[in-house]
């Protein structure tokens, strides 16, 4: 836990709003495998991490709410009788969205003040947005005794993302951030919203994230476009979601689809299957097999689902070429962000040096290497 950040958030809250507040830690997440399967009601394999959002939240003694983004040095005031999305409102819409969705549920939210900050690497695709939403939902629930379950909170967070931010995300990010457990990843069934926890110990290997430090600003539109394609194909197949389809089913409607849309749907069906095989490989402690599944998943995202980019593909090619890397893939919505790599512990330094030098020589920008621990989900800090 980032004690410096906690202290900075506390000090800022005290300075602006006084001594009465709660502290909430809400983690970002990684996803071992299962990209774009969550909104197809399929399977994903995320874990909460030891980087995220720290929030101080307390009751306001006026009719106005104040929100302070510590890292951005920005402050925003709003009243509770006019909660609506702000065009290009950025972080403000995550907070407004949670409040607005609570109000839609008939829950009265009294005025509050909040200060938040994070240590999630910028643009890395580690879901700082879900962490922020969860921290606000969880904090308001604790502060005002709203009586919500964690499941109800994550649905509020998800709807905030849909209706105030404009990204029609699945439930994975909010679920992993809320329910994560230390040293465990969760095989999440996005239909039933139930998870099986798997202790993660890669023995001689460790997870390494490499942030490409690029974002091609396509994510929101392209994400919603991919979702539309998936829903269209499910409709043609007369199934609720692609989770219910097989490769054989897809062949039946192939003639009604463009090749590009057929490949996108095929990727989702195959990726869903890969998640289940990945879980089996974890049970078998088969790191080599896990690495192979990561590489297959990247291939699918690069050539079928088409959400990768040159920088991410380069990082995965570097992993393939290195004898101490079991496997790698791009992680997240796409078009930038991180790759997730399974690397031998005794080669971490060597691999990090090699890949950062080669990346800089190729693209003229730096990539950055991060290590994360799997951690507890959203909780109060004493």
Image: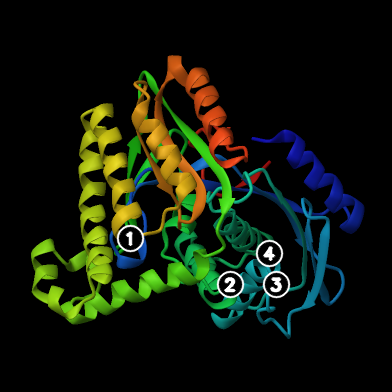
Residue wearing tag 3: 89
Disc 1/disc 2 C-alpha distance (Å): 23 Å
Give how far across and how far down residue 325 sits, in percent. Answer: 37, 26
Q: Nearer the viewer, residue 130 or 110?
A: 130
**Which numbered disc covers residue 165?**
2
Q: Nearer the viewer, residue 342 or 255?
A: 255
Q: Which quadrant is the C terminus positioned in?
A: top right
Disc 4/disc 2 C-alpha distance (Å): 9 Å
First in sequence: mark 1 vs mark 2: 2
Residue wearing tag 4: 91
Q: What residue is drawn where x is 37% and y is 69%?
A: 226
First in sequence: mark 1 vs mark 4: 4
Residue wearing tag 1: 305
Q: Is residue 48 left or right of residue 268?
A: right
Q: Nearer the viewer, residue 172 or 252?
A: 252
Give how far across and how far down residue 73 sits, in percent. Answer: 83, 55
């Amino acid at each position: 836990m980032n004690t410096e950040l906690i202290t900075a958030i506390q000090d800022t809250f005290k300075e602006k709003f006084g001594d009465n507040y709660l502290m909430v830690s809400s983690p970002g997440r990684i996803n071992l495998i299962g990209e774009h399967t969550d909104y197809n009601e399929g399977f994903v394999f995320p874990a909460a991490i030891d980087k995220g959002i720290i929030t101080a939240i307390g009751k306001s003694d006026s009719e106005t709410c104040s929100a302070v983004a510590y890292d951005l040095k920005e402050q925003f005031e709003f009243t509770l009788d006019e909660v609506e999305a702000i065009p290009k409102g950025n972080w403000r819409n995550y907070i407004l969205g949670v409040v607005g969705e609570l109000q839609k549920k008939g829950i009265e939210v009294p005025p509050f003040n909040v200060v938040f900050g994070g240590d999630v690497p910028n643009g890395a695709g580690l879901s700082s947005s879900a962490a922020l939403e969860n921290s606000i939902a969880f904090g308001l629930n604790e502060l005002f005794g709203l009586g919500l379950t964690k499941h109800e909170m994550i649905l509020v967070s998800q709807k905030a993302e849909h209706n105030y931010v404009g990204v029609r995300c699945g439930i994975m990010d909010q679920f992993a951030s809320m329910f994560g457990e230390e040293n465990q990843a969760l095989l999440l069934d996005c239909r039933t919203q139930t998870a099986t926890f798997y202790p993660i110990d890669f023995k001689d290997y460790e997870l390494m994230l490499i942030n490409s430090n690029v974002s091609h600003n396509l994510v929101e539109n392209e994400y919603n476009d991919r979702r539309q394609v998936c829903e269209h194909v499910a409709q043609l197949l007369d199934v609720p979601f692609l989770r219910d389809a097989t490769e054989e089913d897809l062949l039946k409607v192939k003639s009604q689809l463009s090749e590009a849309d057929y490949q996108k749907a095929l990727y989702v069906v195959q990726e869903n299957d890969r998640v289940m095989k990945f879980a089996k490989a974890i049970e078998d402690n088969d790191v080599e097999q896990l690495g192979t599944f990561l590489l297959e998943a990247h291939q699918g995202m690069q050539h079928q689902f088409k959400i990768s980019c040159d920088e991410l593909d380069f990082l995965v090619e570097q992993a393939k070429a290195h004898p101490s890397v079991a496997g790698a893939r791009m992680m997240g919505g796409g078009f930038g962000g991180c790759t997730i790599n399974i690397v031998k512990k005794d080669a971490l330094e060597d691999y990090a040096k090699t890949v950062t030098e080669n990346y800089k020589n190729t693209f003229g920008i730096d990539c950055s290497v991060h290590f994360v621990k799997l951690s507890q989900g959203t909780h109060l800090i004493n």
